Image (cartoon, rainbow, N blue to C red):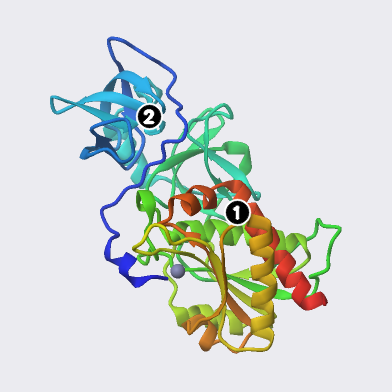
Amino acid sequence: MKKLCLLFGLLIIFLFSFQSSLTAYAQDGKDYRVGATSLNVRSEPDMDATYIGSLETDSVVTVYEERYGWARIDYNGQTGWVASHFLYQSNQSKKASNNSDERLRGKEISVAVDGVYIRTGPGTNHSIIDQAYQGESFQQIEQKNDWVLVQLENGETGWIAGWLIAQSSKGRGKTNPQPQTSSNSSNHSLKGYNIVVDAGHGGFDPGAIGIDYSFEKTLALKTAHTVAKQLRNAGATVIMTRSGDQFLALEERINISQSYDTHAFISLHYNAYPLSGVNGVSTYYYAGGADRSLADEIQQQLVGKTQMQDDGVQYGDFHVLRENSDLAVLVELGFLTNPHDYSVIQTNNYQLNVAQAITQGVMNHFND
Ligand SMILES: [Zn+2]
């Protein structure tokens, strides 16, 4: 939500360097192809090391050494390091020119089920870099055996198992939320409740920008999908204001909420602050009464389940709360600018805890 963070934003590629899919160690160097849209080159094998340049998609580099997920290359005559995660063996794909053409013509595919893993390479032995949910659509770049290489929202690429996709004819960026109900749960205590899950920001509005140039909009969307799934498992009908990376004005979010018989509107955000020591989770309400009580229930569950610093339930004069006649709260799920929060909030475990906490908070509110 913090405006100052909007000042950064463009021209930035973020890297993950958790695990390596690079298996070869070669003294004399071995050629690899760059699989990211733009891959940062640094002076040392460290995310905080000096940035010395970047490599284009499909360019071929010679790797001389691999260390902790970083690959040593020669960059314009000097030693450089790149996240090896984004390198593929260069003989695994066609020449760059063919590949670009293919990318432009790439067909759109959509994910057939919830929780599909996106991996660094075409096989279940490769590292997981993200998760996709039913109906999410991607541009296909290439296909290898039963695996499909797709373009991700953050500009990177990843592989999805072909048997988990459905051909898609839907366009992107159009807001047409469809309510979905759950059919596979024994606990239906939220049956009959319509919940709007609102992932903050999106499209050209990245929201807060944190460590490693992480975008609030990306994490908020991931959380929104996880929360929506958990609410559906509890029997709720869930409407998402956005299910992809698209811009949505605050008024549109409220319109979506008010075009349904909404019982609760929950807006999901991550925070940022100039002082990196500031951390924690908080829940905001605008009106007292029911809004305040829902905020209390959610905050209590969040702190209990995630063990994050409790920044409390607070009054917040946010547009999506103030102008919304439905029961509405806004949740700030941690600081992208705090190293501890940042390392925790990206884990699948944290995402699941948040989803369970919000669902339990909503159930407590309606069932008490
Ligand atoms: Zn925000």
Q: Quadrant of ligand 1?
A: bottom left
On the picture, is 169 further left or further right than 234?
Answer: left
Q: Secondary structure at mark 1?
A: helix
On the picture, is 367 further left or further right than 122?
Answer: right
Q: Is mark 1 within 8 Å of ligand 1?
A: no
Q: Is residue 49 above or below residue 174?
A: above
- Disc 2: which residue: 84
Q: Position of residue 324 (x, y in %)?
A: 56, 86
What's the amino acid at mark 1? Gln
Residue pushed farthest left?
A: 77
Residue 351 tag number? 1
On the picture, is 352 further left or further right than 245?
Answer: right
User: Badge 2, how many Cα within 10 Å: few under 14, some, many 20+?
Assistant: many
Of labels 1 and 2, the one closer to you: 1
Q: Secondary structure at mark 2?
A: helix
Locate the N terminus and report the quarter of the image it occupies.
bottom left
Report, in whole angstroms, how far the alpha carbon at label 1 lies from the one at label 2.
26 Å
Residue pushed farthest right?
A: 186
What's the amino acid at mark 2? Ser
